Image (tube, rainbow, N blue to C red):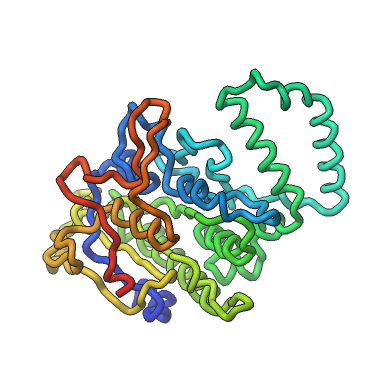
Amino acid sequence: VSLYPNRAKHWGKFSLVRSMEAWDSVHLRAQYTVQSAHLFNPALQKELPPIGSVIAYESAARRRPTDTLPGYVAVNMTSPQVGLIKSGFLPATYTPFHVDTAVGASTLSMDDAARKEFVRRWELLQVFDERLRNDSSLAAKAYHDYHNHYEGAVSMMSDSRASQVFAVDPADHDRYGKSLVGDGLVVARNLVEVDAGTHFVIVNQTFWDHHGRIYGEANHYKMSRDLDAALGALLEDLTSRRRADGRSLLDETLVACYGEFGRTPGELNPGRGRDHYQYAFTGLFAGGGVKGGRVIGRTDELGAKIVDPGWDAKRSVYMEDVATTIYSALGFDWTKKVENTPSGRTFYYIEPFASRQFIRSREITPLFA
């Protein structure tokens, strides 16, 4: 409560999973698994799509003529060591659209006059390259990817809602904690509320890697305050804002908050910090049918070892299980596989068995029971 007072006010809206474990304790590889639900493989790194792109691909059939926003939006993903994973072998239509709230959304914030000029110039460009756009010999994926990017960008920028969605109102900036993660969650809330085609949003909060002076004022405590204000405000807004049928935005949105691994328990290291630790950490889940006010799993008193996984799998919860839960909550078949990949290797939304241990991924059912 002392570190997260705003979040504590919403205890009945979320549950904690204390039995999470990562396959790796190296940033690049663990961050890759968080985004993709697959283990890092340099040979397939550019081929495999991330969770968000798979969801955008699966959601394409649901898109309406008024859905002008990208299916997958990433916010403030400028710092992860692995970078932002693109769409892999999927068409560029499903590549994450990146928003950096430190830069702002000025390119999308056009007034009516600027938007008319933009449309005029776009129509002129189409006249110039009409032959290219209709040349059947240009069948390469790279060409179609560029074409899809152009079409998607124009569709979004021609919609007056885009400038409002990607802009952060000053009052929201203050209420969400005056931080980058706060601004990122404002954008995420806006995307959910406008309901214009975006089905997956990832927001990054950087600088948790406190190998030294972890309890310095600018480190753990500041990061906790920033996250507490932002996540508390998000849960409040998603709960209070409702659709015409009476459902809250939280009812239809699965919120998941976690890192790629934990930090070493027990005594601090010589630099008065904590290092990477893959064997036990906690995730927060809310909305989308999640029952609030629960703690799933238990560690020993140091937080070093999982002593009770808290679910019927009788093992730790891995990122594959989280992705399985996300796909299932959205109504997608997480056992689906794609055969015609560039490498010829079958792509499974979720691998049938994890390669580090012989385990079968499954939904985290206690979150919903």
At 46% from the left and 68% from the top, the residue drawn is 231
Q: Relative to the observer, which residue lies in front, 23 or 154?
A: 154
Relative to 250, say whether 198 is above or below. Answer: above
Q: Position of residue 316 (x, y in %)?
A: 19, 58
Q: Position of residue 221 (x, y in %)?
A: 37, 64
Q: Position of residue 343 (x, y in %)?
A: 37, 26
Relative to 235, say whether 9 is above or below. Answer: below
Relative to 39, say whether 106 is above or below. Answer: below
Name, please, the residue furthest toward the top.
137
Query: Does the image show residue 167?
Result: yes
At 83% from the left and 36% from the top, the residue drawn is 123
At 58% from the left and 81% from the top, the residue drawn is 246
Q: Relative to the observer, which residue lies in front, 222 or 21?
A: 21
Query: Does the image show residue 75?
Result: no
Report how many numbered discs are placed on residues in the image: 0
Q: Which quarter of the figure is the N terminus placed in? A: bottom left
Q: Position of residue 353 (x, y in %)?
A: 22, 45
Q: Which quarter of the figure is the C terminus placed in? A: bottom left
At 41% from the left and 31% from the top, the residue drawn is 340
Q: Quadrant of residue 227?
A: bottom left
Q: Is residue 131 left or right of residue 245?
A: right
Q: Relative to the observer, which residue lies in front, 32 or 88?
A: 88
